Image (cartoon, rainbow, N blue to C red):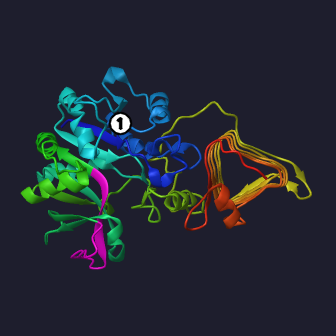
Amino acid sequence: MKVLAIVLAGGEGKRLMPLTADRAKPAVPFGGIYRLIDFVLSNLANAHYLQIVVLTQYKNHSLDRHISRTWRLSAMLGNYVTPVPAQQRLGPHWFSGSADALFQNLNLIYDELPDHVIVFGADHIYRMDPRQMVDQHIDSGADVTVAAIRQPLDLADQFGVIETDPSGRRIVAFKEKPKDAVGLADAPDQIYASMGNYVFKTQALIEALREDALDPSSRHDLGGNIIPMFVKSGGAEVYDFAHNVVPGSTDRDRGYWRDVGTLDAYYEANMDLISVHPVFNLYNDRWPIYTGNEPLPPAKFVHNEGDRIGHALESIVSPGVIVSGGTALRSILSPGVVLHSHSHVEDSVLMGCVKIGRGAVVRRAIIDKNVVIPDGARIGFDLEYDSKRFTVTRSGVVVIGKNEIVDR
C-alpha cells in the first residue's frame, strides 16, 4: 500500500509576530535546537513514511534551507523530503487556502500515484505514530479519516469540532468554533477537536479538490470545505488520538498535543519541556525528534567565585552555550547563547546567539536570535515600559524580535 505524505507549511503565523516577521511559522525555533516543522517530519520518518512533500509559501527561505540541510533521505531508495514553494502553476495567484494548495500541486500526487495521501499540518508539538491512523483508515474503507483530540466541552469555540454518529466513528458534522457543541457519547463533558491531520483515499481527494476548485463561493479550505463534502457523502471517519500509542511514551506525556498558534501557547509549550518529569519528553529515544546538528562545541559553565557562579537549574542548555558567571533558572538556552557575569535569566526562552550582558536580568521573556541585552538591563519587570518597546502578550510575556536593538 503506497502512501504519500504532504505537509502543509505555508501559513503566515500572524499571531506569532514578531517571531514570524522574518520566517515562516513552521521554521520558528522551539525547544533549543528544533524547528516547529521537525515534529511532524519526525513523526512521519519514525513511521517509515519517507516520501514527503512540504508545501511552503510565505517567507520560506529559512524553512527551505532547514529542510534541505537537515532532512536528507536516501534518493537511491526513492525516499525524500522535498520543500515545494508556491509555483503559480495554474495562474498568477498564490494559495488561497489549504485545499487550493493541494489542488495547485496535484502534479505531485500524479507523479507518485499513491493509494492514500496523508495531509498533516506543520506547526504542532506532539508525538504520533501515523501508521495506526492509516491502518484504521484502510480497514474502515472511509474516503477520509480526520485525527481528533479530546478537549473540554467549554473550549469547543476554540476548535474545529467533530460530531459523530452513535458508533463514535462516522462523522456527521464538522463545525468551526461552535457555540452549541454537543459532548461525546462516552464523555459528555468532552468534544473531538480536529488536529488538522488527515488521511485520504487518493482518488476521492482528487475528485473533491477538483469540485472545490470550481466553486467560486468556497474558501478552498480543507477543514471548512473539503471535509464537509465527505461528511455529507458519509465517507468521513474520526481517528481518536487517545488511542495512539507511541513507543517509549509514558502516562505523563502520552496524548500530548499543543497548537502553538499564539505567543502565549508557544511560550507555555516551551515551558512544558523543562520540568523534572516533563509534560512533553524530548528524551524518548524510541521515537526521537530529529533536527540538524550544527558543528558547535559543548556547553560551558564558568566562574565559581562568591556570587559570580555560572549555573543553570531546571533548564535546557544547548550546544555552544556559555554560562559565564550568570544564572539560568527554568529557561531554554538555544545554541550560541551567552550569559555574562551576574546576569540572571528565569522562565524565559532565549533563541540562537542571544547575549545577556553583565548584571542584566530577564524574566518571562521570549528573545529571538542575535539580540544583545545590554549590561544592567531589566526585561520583564515593568511591563508598561516594555510594551512601549516590545511585544507583551496577554499573560505578560515580553517578546523581543530577531536582531532588535535593545536599549538599557
Mark 1, secondary structure of its residue: strand
Residue 330 seen in render:
no
**Residue 320 magenta-drawn?**
no
Residue at point 19%, 46% (across, down): 200
Question: In the picture, residue 79 is in which quadrant?
Answer: top left
In the image, residue 247 lies at what x, y percent?
Answer: 40, 52
Left or right of 282 on screen, residue 126: left
Is residue 81 depicted above or below 129 in this figure?
A: above
- For badge 1, the amino acid type reads Val
Left or right of 298 on screen, residue 368: left
In the image, residue 149 lies at what x, y percent?
Answer: 32, 63
**Residue labelled with disc 1:** 54
Q: Spot the residue most to the top.
A: 76
Pick whichever, 135 or 263, lies toward us. 263
Q: Which residue range is magenta in the image?
A: 177-197
Q: Spot the residue most to the left.
A: 233
